[in-house]
Structures are given as structure tokens and as C-alpha cells.
Amino acid sequence: MNLSVSHDRGDEDLDAKAKWFQSLTVNERMDVFVEMMDLIIGLNPSILEERDAESVPGRVRVLRLPGR
């Protein structure tokens, strides 16, 4: 895992973030996921009690490959 600090704005675009995430091993990806979940739960513990979440129109983009 690359632990260096970058000051390049290009490293902040979605393609760069996706490329970084894809470079991680499965275990490293799960570590990132667990850390994010710990952060979310730490900031909003009541999120575990919420049920029946509804999608927000216009906030989710579904991408499909042509022909699928």
C-alpha cells in the first residue's frame, strides 16, 4: 500500500481514487471498508437502528455496459 502524501489535484479525481482502490489487495480493501464503517458509526451511532431506508431521486447513478 502506498502511504506517501501527494499534493497533486489529479490524485483527487474519481478515476485516480478507483485506480488506487483497485490496486489494494482484498484484505486491504476490507480494512478500508471496516475503517469507513467505524467512522460512520462513530459519527452517527443511531445509524445502526435506522430501517427502511429509501433512495433519494437523482442521487444514485446506475451504469451498465452496452448490450447488457
Image: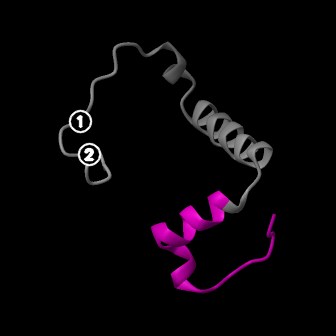
Residue identified by numbered label 2: 59
Q: Secondary structure at mark 1?
A: loop
Query: Which residue is at a point 26% across and 54% down the rendered structure image?
Result: 66
Badge 2: residue crowd in 10 Å (few <14, some 14–19, many ≥20) = few
Residue sitting at the far front:
67
Q: Is residue 18 magenta?
A: yes
Left/right of residue 10 with respect to residue 56 in the rendered view = right
Residue identified by numbered label 1: 56
Query: Which residue is at a point 68% across and 35% down the rendered structure image?
Result: 38
Give the magenta part as a residue range.
1-22
**Position of the N terminus by quadrant:** bottom right
Q: Nearer the viewer, residue 52 or 22?
A: 22
Q: Amino acid at mark 2?
A: Arg
Q: Are marks 2 and 1 in contact (CB under 8 Å)?
A: yes
Instruction: Tell me where residue 68 appears, x and y as whole percent.
Output: 29, 44
Query: Which residue is at a point 47% across and 73% down the rendered structure image?
Result: 13
Instruction: Tell me where residue 46 appears, x and y as whole percent.
Output: 51, 20
Q: Amino acid at mark 1?
A: Val
Q: Which colour scheme appears in the figure?
A: one colour
Left/right of residue 32 with respect to residue 55 in the rendered view = right
